[in-house]
Amino acid sequence: MKGFFLLLLLLAPAANCWVIDKCALAQKLKEGGVIGIKNYKLEDYLCLAHYASGYDTSMHTSRTEYGIFQINSFWWCTDGKTIGRKNICGMRCSDLLDEDVTDDIRCLNRIVREPKGLESWIPWEVSCKGKDVSSFSDGC
């Protein structure tokens, strides 16, 4: 019986985890109109999602970053606790934590139009920028 309860405890955190299939995300990115902004390709966005969250739409870090793209609460969304926040995307950060990535992509669209573009994300700069990321869209 102890083993059963231990198994339930181990599985409980996974119940709130929403990992989206990369090809489903690719389709949503195409529909969201971000492809081609500043010459960014589909693979760039998939690489970002891979390294930022592992395609987990429910990802929330202690650094106040939210969702599949780890959007920061100081600049882009409101979490009700970050002091001096800007909320440029005009949304609640909690909206970025569900399985619907439409609002995440809408905010992403806004962010990549800023001067830094994808360079706003350290995971993209470190793991994707200037690298062959073509494999990220394989099979899609």
Image (tube, rainbow, N blue to C red):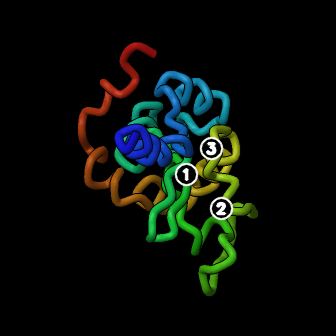
Where residue 84 appears, x then y in whole percent? 63, 86
| Residue 105: image tag | 3
* Front disc: 3 or 1: 1
Mark 1: few/some/many CA within 10 Å (<14, 14-19, 20+): many
Tags 2 and 1 touching, CB below 8 Å: yes
Q: In the rendered structure, which amino acid carries the disc numbered 3?
A: Ile
Residue 20 at x, y = what percent?
Answer: 52, 32
In percent of the image, x 30 and y 44: which residue is there?
Answer: 128
Residue visible at 51% across and 69% down in the picture: 64
- Residue extending farthest to the bottom is 83
Which dot marks residue 67? Answer: 1
Q: Does residue 113 lie above or below 38 as drawn?
A: below
Q: Considering depth in this image, is 139 or 61 the residue closer to the camera?
A: 61
Give the Cα distance between marks 3 and 2: 13 Å
CB atoms of marks 3 and 2 within 8 Å: no
- Secondary structure beneath dot 2 equals helix
Which tag, 2 or 1, sits closer to the chain's start? 1
Q: Circle 2: is it few (<14), some (14-19), or many (20+) Cα within 10 Å?
A: many
Q: Amino acid at mark 1?
A: Gly
- The amino acid at mark 2 is Cys
- Residue ID for mark 2: 93
- Pinpoint residue 69: horizontal percent, then vertical percent: 50, 50
Quarter of the image holding residue 111?
A: bottom right
